[in-house]
Amino acid sequence: MCGIVGYVGPKSTVDVLIGGLRRLEYRGYDSAGVSVISEGHLQTRKKAGKLVNLIGEIDSHPIPVSHIGIGHTRWATHGAPTDGNAHPHLGGTREKLSLIHNGIIENFSELKAELLAEGTRFASDTDSEVAAHLIAREYDKAGDLVVAFRTVVNRLHGAFTILVVHEDQPDVVLAARRNAPLVIGLGDGENFLGSDVAAFVEHTKRAISVGQDEIVILRAESVEIIGFDGKPVTSEEFTVDWDATAASKGGWPSFMAKEIADQPQAVADTLMGRVDSEGRVSIPEMDGLSAEDIKNIDRIIIVACGTASYAGDIAKYGIEKWSRIPVQVELSHEFRYRDPIVTKNTLIVAISQSGETMDTLMATRYARDLGAKVLAICNTQGATLARESDATIYTHAGPEVAVASTKALVAQITAGFLLGLYLAEVRGATPSSELQKLGRELLRLPAQVSEVIEGLDEAKALGAAMASAKSVLFLGRNVGFPVAMEGALKLKELAYIHAEGFAAGELKHGPIALIEEGQPVIVIVPSLRDEDSLHPKVISNIQEIRARGAKVIAIAEVGDTEVGQWSEHVIFVPETEQLFAAILTVIPLQAFAMALAEAKGLDVDQPRNLAKSVTVE
Ligand code: F6R
């Protein structure tokens, strides 16, 4: 939440900052602002609303050339999304210092009272402005910006990435990080700061992920990192494994449309190097967990939020079935605060696209403190979650820009299944021949996902035709149940209409009361070939709701000759293993929600009230 960018170097700073903010806008779009130092003076422009408003403001009040500055795109926490509450915030009576902040300063009331008592006047309702005034005040006392900055960040509680520039030191950007992301981009005679690498990947692929409680002193020719205690810190450089074109629309009408189309690649890249042609699964990144550790696991707890939690729900079916390890899936925020049972033999699997979701980070920190091992499934290199875990399986979905998750989800499910097959093999829980058969089936998925994507027109047309629907229900069984919940979530967040996903078997226990004449219901139908005979049960469920007036859209496996008799529309997906069908059946639901939202004229990349990376609890 909130995107942060900083720059020192020879390029036009405003251009670098705006370019960075454009790529970070998915993190929040309530307001945007920049501060640069130009001809020895701070120049600040900020505006409520999307980045385009700030660009308009800069066009009408141009900024003279500058080589140092900071930029911010906001997801509002303290204070409404107004011009005044937009970042940057200026500090001190002489307003020589400018600050941007991502996170929440939990003790801001107490600090603000201290400043008010001294007569400080505030221009905004934000917690962030408090830090700007405190640093300006300390600098006036100490005369040393780094000392002043360090003194203040040590007084702040909560989560923050803070960047500061000061007129008196026109060659340096200072940054501090606690519980919120910050990455350095290393250039040649120029350096960058960003909430993630997207902020600067068009300029450099060399990056350093800043650790917890660290301060960065960034100049054009040097980068120094110290701890909040003032001691030097050494950090490892990494190379960003995607380029700027991966994070651009590339001719698609929206990032979401592009990211839906990217899904065959996301699945293929996540499988790459992890399944050989015989179907044997190996996950070299799991080396942080020895075979002994794996054999000792007596329970897996998957922690995640939102769409990532549905990936966990789906993975659970495979992990339990093949490895015979009990798996529970927990929403990170619920898990953390309910005194859960965690021992050293518990494996926590944390699933997160961003690797910065605060709820998930808090859950994993808590579990580690109780002695558990943590395995991350994460899409973002250098993310905090990956840094803080014993091992990380990266989902190679590439940058996901649209706020609603699509390709990261299918990559997370793929990684979850890989994990299940790997654990089963190490523990000898399922015959290798069976596991390899599943591994070979996994290898067919990218082509099958392509096939689904090529056939999305029907799902889109159905979505567009339903723009006036008040409510859509989703039903599924087995892995179809979390798929149904994901379908409902996509519709809520993109189209702002009521949607619910139910377990089809649960229908008669209450939700069937919702069915009335004309109610649209999307049903995820298990394969007709399914050995547990779930298919006839779901067909019965369809009949029950149709008898009460529901209009049914079924998502079913090709060759299902029965479902068409009981549904208004059927969208067919290719044949695959029963559990892997989750990956194929969720895609039409993404396209359906996107088309419905577009038909309502909504922005599918940046739905209202949301931000992509939820870095506050
Ligand atoms: C929904 C969506 C969210 C995220 C959730 C977790 O489309 O994107 O529900 O899945 O906020 O985010 P990550 O995966 O970054 O931890």
Image (cartoon, rainbow, N blue to C red):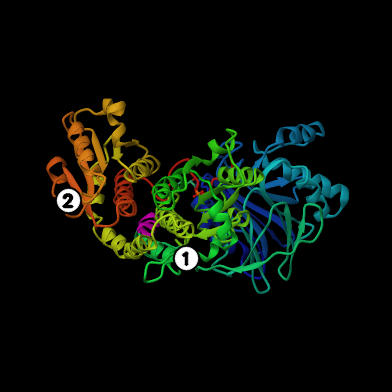
Q: Give the left or right position of residue 447, taking residue 184 as reference.
A: left
- Residue on which the image places disc 1: 282
Q: Quadrant of residue 69?
A: bottom right
Task: State the residue at coordinates (70%, 51%).
Answer: 98
Q: Earlier in the sequence, mark 2 or mark 1?
A: 1
- Residue on which the image places disc 2: 560
Can the viewer see residue 404? no
Q: What kind of element bears circle 1? A: loop
Task: State the residue at coordinates (14%, 46%).
Answer: 562
Contact, mark 2 vs mark 1 (Cβ under 8 Å) = no
| Vertical comparison of 210 with 495: above or below | below
Q: Give coordinates of residue 180: x percent, y percent.
A: 63, 49
| Vertical comparison of 436 with 131: above or below | below
Q: Quadrant of the C terminus?
A: top right
Can the viewer see residue 565? yes
The kind of residue tagged 2 is: Asp
Q: Please, which residue is most extreme toward the left here?
A: 565
Q: Main secondary structure of the magenta part?
A: helix
Q: Specify the segment rendered in magenta.
A: 253-260
The kind of residue tagged 1 is: Ser
* Closer to the eye: label 2 or 1: 1
Task: Judge the density around disc 1: few (<14), some (14-19), many (≥20) Cα neighbours within 10 Å.
Answer: some
- 393 part of magenta stretch: no
Q: Give the left or right position of residue 9, taking residue 516 as reference.
A: right
